[in-house]
Image (cartoon, rainbow, N blue to C red):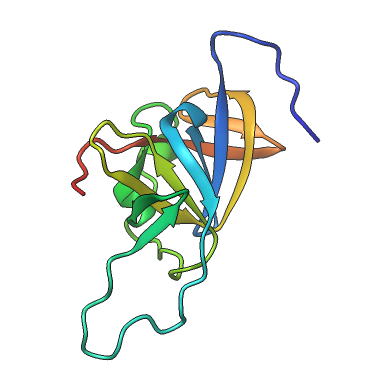
């Protein structure tokens, strides 16, 4: 069922991200692309060799894939559980599962992260770092500005 929120300057379009058992939301305007992850081999490296760089190519554009906490961060302030969300202790998805969400960047390198599943896009109003969509609370995330690709 689609949410029918009246238009307002406080209402934005969001993409819901499900990762490590939690619901997160990021404004759709922060995203450059969202696509289904390609399947990687179950054992991408030999024992003792370094892990390969995690890169996906979508529409001819390479996307450098990092764990979600290195790409997005909870909105500071507001909801007490949002800013202190335990991102560092969560396990990232195994390579090749789910979806890839890439953020917009003026730096020339596309940076993204893997998520279990998506919801949206949908319109909602965030209050205190949290929004409600489809009878669920989604904690608001924003792109990190301290990344290096």
x and y percent of residue 139 in the render? 50, 38
x and y percent of residue 105 in the render? 31, 34
**Residue at figure coordinates x 29%, y 89% from the top left:** 46
**Residue at figure coordinates x 47%, y 25% from the top left:** 128
The number of discs equals 0
Would residue 3 be found to the left or right of residue 29 on screen? right
Q: Is residue 77 above or below residue 65?
A: above
In the rendered image, the residue lying farthest to the bottom is 47
x and y percent of residue 64 in the render? 32, 54
Would residue 38 be found to the left or right of residue 118 on screen? left
The answer to whether residue 86 is seen in the rendering is no
Q: Is residue 66 above or below residue 81?
A: below
**Residue at figure coordinates x 43%, y 40% from the top left:** 81
**Residue at figure coordinates x 27%, y 91% from the top left:** 47
Residue 16 position by quadrant: top right
Of the pair 106 and 147, the residue shown nearer to us: 106
Q: Is residue 54 above or below residue 32?
A: below
The answer to whether residue 85 is seen in the rendering is yes
Would residue 49 be found to the left or right of residue 130 on screen? left
Residue 6 position by quadrant: top right
In the rendered image, the residue lying farthest to the right is 1
Residue 66 position by quadrant: bottom left
x and y percent of residue 113 in the render? 40, 52
């Amino acid at each position: 069922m689609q949410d029918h929120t009246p238009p307002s300057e406080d209402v934005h379009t969001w993409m819901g991200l499900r990762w490590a058992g939690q619901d997160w939301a990021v404004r759709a305007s922060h995203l450059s692309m969202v696509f289904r992850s390609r399947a990687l081999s179950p054992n991408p490296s030999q024992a003792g060799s370094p892990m390969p760089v995690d890169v996906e190519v979508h529409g001819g554009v390479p996307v450098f894939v990092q764990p979600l906490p290195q790409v997005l961060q909870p909105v500071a302030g507001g909801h007490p559980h949002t800013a202190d969300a335990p991102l560092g202790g969560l396990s990232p998805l195994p390579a090749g599962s789910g979806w890839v969400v890439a953020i917009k960047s003026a730096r020339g390198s596309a940076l993204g992260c893997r998520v279990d599943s998506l919801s949206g896009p949908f319109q909602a109003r965030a209050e205190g770092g949290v929004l409600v969509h489809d009878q669920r609370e989604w904690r608001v995330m924003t792109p990190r500005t301290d990344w290096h690709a």
